Amino acid sequence: MTQPARLVITPVNGFRQLSDFIRLPRRLYAGMAGYMPPLDMEQRALLDPKHSGFYSHGEGQYFLAMRDGRPVGRVSAQVDRLIEKTSPATGLTPTTGFFGALDAVDPSVVKPLLDTAAAWLKSRGMTKMLGPWTLNSNGEYGIMIEGQQALPMVMMPWHPPYLGAAVEAADLGKTMDVLSYQMEMGPEAEAAHIVPRTLQVGEGRLGALSVRKLDPRNVERDGEILRSLYNGTWQDTWGFIPYTHEEMAGMIRDIRPILKAEHFVLVEQEGAPAGVALVVPNVFDVAGDLGGAPSLLGWGKLGVRLLRHEFHSARVILLGVSRKLAGTALGALLPALLIRELMNRGHELPYRQIELGWVLETNLPMRRLIERIVPEPCKRHRVYSREL
């Protein structure tokens, strides 16, 4: 009787193995219903230590699971020094380590990968393993539990249905679910009326407020406004790790070729930033049929589609409100005003749908606001933990 091939887990070293690590999900999940591979280029910006802003404040190690000389699974283990600057309300401690980038050809590969990540973290003094975060909570987030057939979305991980169950079988327990909701775009969409039409920025009791788009001549400045308001809004939220200046600058640099002024909503109160939101076009709309590594012809098609801005969906990736307005009626109203402004831009942007992602299941005020329009989430991702 032929013995099953032994599973060997090795640390990733060098450009070639890193390339195998980046490409692995599209090789494992090719042909699975609902899966669409992201561009390798996009994933390299997220994972490559030479490009990822994470490595300015963290360290990590990638691992590949090999069987018969072929990679059949992957995982990352990482430690983020920014935790030392976070609030106790985040639930994170200096001895919380993380795993991420978890993908496997079948459930049998998952526990050995997670045990390897746990051993690496324990050797660095960590007492708890949390994840998957790639590489922290400002990157890709959670195991997809529901929504495999939903619209693929930029910077949103996809996993087969068996992966979550395999993680739980590896002695990790659920810590938090994050939810995503899909809304229809356009000024006539129901979501555009989540606040009364009588409440208009610049009019009546909102007369002290004004709204503007991204200033193309001052993108870096607007990026810093976005970072400051985002960090201030969520700093006492579970799992929060602040965006650094380098990470925000890197994100803006990466999305700038597809960034339009209309993607940025800034509400100001007497000239001071009060609330901000950033929406990013869904790259899958223009690259999903080209594979993770397009041919020369494919790159040509992608270039034409980008020039024509042939997107039909987008995702709100960051939203923030000034800490000065916390606990006020205006502070509570601003998220709805920001979302409505994005909806109203349907006549300027070609999108039919917009996705609001990674809403904590415990964030009941935000959920109530969204679920007035969209009663059920389109996707659910789960974060797990294990004591080491």
Image: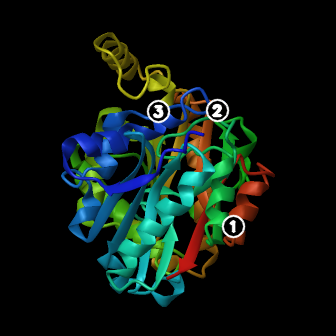
Q: CA distance from mark 2 to mark 3?
A: 14 Å
Placement of 248 over or under 116, stated as above or below: above
Q: Earlier in the sequence, mark 2 or mark 3?
A: 3
Going by the numbered disc 3, the residue's amino acid type is: Arg
Classify residue 268 by image quadrant.
bottom left
Badge 3 density bin: few <14, some 14–19, many ≥20, Cα 10 Å: some
Residue 215 image point, x, y percent: 30, 46
Circle 1 sits on which residue? 361
Q: Who's the residue at 77% across and 49% down the image?
A: 373
Residue at mark 3: 27
Return the x and y of residue 5 as percentages of the image width and height.
Answer: 49, 45
- In this rendering, position of residue 245 left or right of residue 199: left
Q: Quadrant of residue 385?
A: bottom right
Residue depicted at x 54% and y 39% = 153
Query: Residue placed farthest to the bottom in the image?
Result: 88
Contact (Cβ within 8 Å) of mark 2 with mark 3: no
Do residues under tags 2 and 1 come within 8 Å of each other at their CB atoms?
no
Q: Dot 2 corresponds to which residue?
A: 34
Q: Is residue 89 left or right of residue 184?
A: left
**Which amino acid is tagged 2?**
Gly
Residue 202 visible in the snapshot = no
Residue 20, image x, y percentages: 33, 40
Mark 2 vs mark 3, foreground winner is 3
Instruction: Choose the circle earlier in sequence order: 2 or 1.
Output: 2
Q: Residue 156: tell me if it is visible.
A: yes
* Disc 3 secondary structure class: helix
Helix, strand or loop at label 1? It is: loop
113 on left or right of 108: left
Please state which of residues 116 and 363 is positioned toward the viewer in this rendering.
Answer: 116
The residue under label 1 is which amino acid type?
Glu
Task: Say which residue appears at 28% left-offset and 13% top-offset.
Answer: 296
